[in-house]
C-alpha cells in the first residue's frame, strides 16, 4: 500500500517538476540580450526568487525524498530468504582411489641395430 502510494506521488512530482522547469524563462532571454543592447540586470543580480523558482525547489526536494523512500522500501522489501531455511547439504564421501596396477608398464626395449654384412 505504502509502496504504491509513494510511486504515485513520485510520478506526479516528476511530471510536475518537468513542467515547472519547462515553464521557466531562461537567463538572457530578454529582448536587449537578443539584439545586443546592454542591460544592467543581464549579468547582475537576479532579483527576488520567482514563484516558479520556489516551485522548482519544492518539487526537487519532494522528488529526492520520494526517491530515497522508494530506495529504502525496495531494499527492505524481502527480509526473509528461502535459502536460509533449508539445511546445509552434506558433501558425499570421497571414493577410494582405484588400486594401482600389479606391475607398472615398462617401456619397450630399443630395437637392435642391423647386423653388418661382411
Image (cartoon, helix red, strand yellow):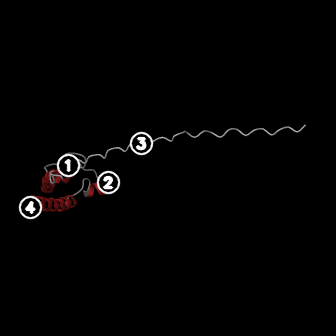
Could you tell me which secondary element the residue under label 1 belongs to? loop
Disc nearest the viewer among 2 and 1: 1
Q: Is residue 77 left or right of residue 112?
A: left
Image marks 3 and 1: residues in contact by CB distance under 8 Å: no
Q: Quadrant of residue 24?
A: bottom left
Tag 2 residue: 36
First in sequence: mark 2 vs mark 1: 2
Query: Which residue occupies the foreground of this view, 8 or 50?
Result: 8
Q: Dot 2, crowdedness within 10 Å: few (<14), some or many (≥20)?
A: few
Q: Which residue is mark 4?
A: 1
- Name the disc covering residue 6, or none: none
Front residue of this view, candidates 99 and 36: 99
Tell me which numbered mark, 2 or 3, is placed earlier along the sequence. 2
Quadrant housing residue 9: bottom left
Label 1 belongs to which residue? 87
In which quadrant of the rendered image does the N terminus lie? bottom left
Label 3: which secondary element: loop
- Front-most of 84 and 1? 84
Q: Disc 1 or 4, which lies upstream in sequence?
A: 4
Q: Determine the residue positioned at 14% across, 55% down.
A: 59
Residue pictured at 30% horizontal, 57% vertical:
34
Q: Residue furthest front?
A: 102
The CA span between labels 4 and 2 is: 57 Å
Whether residues under marks 1 and 4 lie with C-beta atoms below 8 angstroms apart, the answer is no
Badge number at residue 97 = 3
- Asked if marks 3 and 4 touch (Cβ < 8 Å), the reply is no
Q: Are marks 4 and 2 in contact (CB under 8 Å)?
A: no
Say left or right for 99 vs 49.
Answer: right
Amino acid at each position: 500500500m505504502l509502496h504504491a502510494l509513494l510511486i504515485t506521488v513520485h510520478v506526479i512530482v516528476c511530471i510536475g517538476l518537468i513542467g515547472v522547469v519547462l515553464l521557466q524563462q531562461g537567463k538572457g532571454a530578454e529582448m536587449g540580450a537578443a539584439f545586443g543592447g546592454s542591460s544592467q540586470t543581464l549579468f547582475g543580480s537576479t532579483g527576488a526568487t520567482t514563484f516558479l523558482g520556489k516551485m522548482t525547489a519544492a518539487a526537487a526536494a519532494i522528488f529526492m525524498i520520494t526517491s530515497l523512500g522508494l530506495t529504502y522500501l525496495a531494499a527492505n522489501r524481502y527480509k526473509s530468504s528461502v535459502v536460509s531455511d533449508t539445511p546445509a547439504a552434506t558433501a558425499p564421501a570421497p571414493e577410494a582411489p582405484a588400486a594401482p596396477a600389479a606391475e607398472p608398464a615398462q617401456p619397450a626395449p630399443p630395437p637392435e641395430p642391423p647386423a653388418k654384412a661382411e
